[in-house]
Image (cartoon, rainbow, N blue to C red):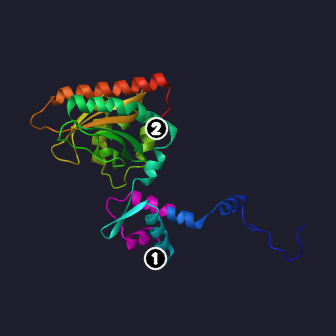
């Protein structure tokens, strides 16, 4: 029973507003805002850059940044901060992701040994690819990227085949995550490259990030949809165990093997 003069919680608010207020955790929201912001940054962000971007004071965010650094979610690089792979590593503990890695890693090991080139498996994260697994070259010389490495879909062979083997509706949804600064002609060129990859069943293209590397990428499929991308950053070294054309065949065959094992084991990814 309400006593006279008692204030009723949520009075004057709509049910939606009251529900939103009920589930708010301001400190947690600030921490998540920081993580989301710096995870999309192309370079380390200083405290002043973070506070300006989030329209908050240094006093509000300084302790949050300290705690995130202490818990290993972000790290200081120069005068700014970048995300670590801690969140990614936690996500890798989920059963579906662990299952695809368990299937892929033995095949990737065979591929790296046969071609004497490194390879990696990439998944999509919003408008980026993120490397979920890698296998080093069996020789003393090779090129590899670290687990958790991210790049925009439009800049990578992995992103090309991931986007290429999606439905038109999914492609359109993924594009909402692309940078608003992406030039229209660059987007058109990416779409055309993806259409070629879909027709060919692979992508073979000089790296847009590392000169001298040729990305050889093939989709890991669930039905006709790409769940992951298997990519070999091909290095033309001396001596060269397999030529580029043969290496591409090996990548495609490895991707087919992973796809077949996923289908037979009914692993959901």
Residue 247, x across and y down, in percent: 21, 29
Residue 240, x across and y down, in percent: 12, 33
Residue 65 visible? The answer is: yes
**Residue 50 colored in magenta in the image:** yes
Give the residue at x 58% y 67%: 26
Q: 219 and 70: which one is in front?
A: 70
First along the sequence among labels 2 and 1:
1
Residue 223 visible? The answer is: no
- Per the image, the residue denoted by label 2 is 98
Give the residue at x 38% y 70%: 49
Q: Callout 2: helix, strand or loop?
A: helix
Residue 90 shown left or right of residue 109 in the figure:
right
The answer to which image quadrant residue 172 occupies is top left
**What's the magenta bit mostly, secondary-structure-wise?**
helix
The mark total stands at: 2
In contact (CB < 8 Å): disc 2 and disc 1 = no
Query: 10 Å neighbourhood of mark 1: few (<14), some, or many (≥20)?
Result: some
- Per the image, the residue denoted by label 1 is 58
Q: 5 and 259: which one is in front?
A: 259
> Which image quarter holds the N terminus?
bottom right
Determine which of the numbered discs, if any, sits on residue 94 in the image: none
Residues drawn in magenta: 32-55
Query: 10 Å neighbourhood of mark 2: few (<14), some, or many (≥20)?
Result: some
Q: 108 and 34: which one is in front?
A: 108
């Amino acid at each position: 029973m309400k006593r006279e003069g008692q204030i009723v919680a949520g009075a004057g608010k709509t049910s939606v507003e009251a529900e939103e207020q009920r589930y708010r955790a301001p400190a947690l929201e600030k921490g998540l805002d920081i993580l989301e912001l710096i995870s999309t940054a192309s370079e380390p962000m200083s405290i002043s850059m973070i506070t300006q971007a989030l329209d908050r004071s240094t006093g509000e965010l300084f302790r949050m940044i300290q705690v995130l650094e202490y818990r290993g979610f972000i790290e200081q690089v120069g005068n700014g901060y970048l995300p670590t792979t801690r969140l990614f590593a936690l996500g890798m503990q989920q059963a579906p992701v662990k299952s695809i890695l368990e299937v892929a890693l033995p095949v990737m090991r065979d591929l790296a040994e046969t071609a004497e080139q490194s390879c990696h498996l990439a998944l999509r994260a919003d408008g980026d690819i993120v490397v979920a697994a890698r296998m080093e070259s069996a020789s003393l010389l090779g090129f590899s990227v670290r687990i958790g490495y991210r790049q925009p879909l439009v800049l990578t062979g992995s992103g090309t085949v991931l986007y290429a083997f999606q439905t038109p509706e999914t492609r359109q949804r993924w594009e909402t995550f692309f940078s608003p600064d992406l030039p229209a002609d660059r987007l058109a060129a990416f779409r055309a490259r993806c259409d070629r990859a879909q027709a060919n069943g692979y992508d073979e293209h000089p790296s847009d990030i590392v000169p001298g590397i040729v990305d050889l990428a093939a989709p890991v499929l669930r039905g006709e949809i790409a769940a992951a991308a298997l990519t070999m950053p091909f290095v033309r070294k001396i001596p060269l165990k397999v030529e580029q054309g043969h290496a591409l065949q090996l990548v495609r065959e490895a991707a087919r093997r992973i796809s077949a094992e996923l289908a037979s084991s009914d692993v959901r990814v």
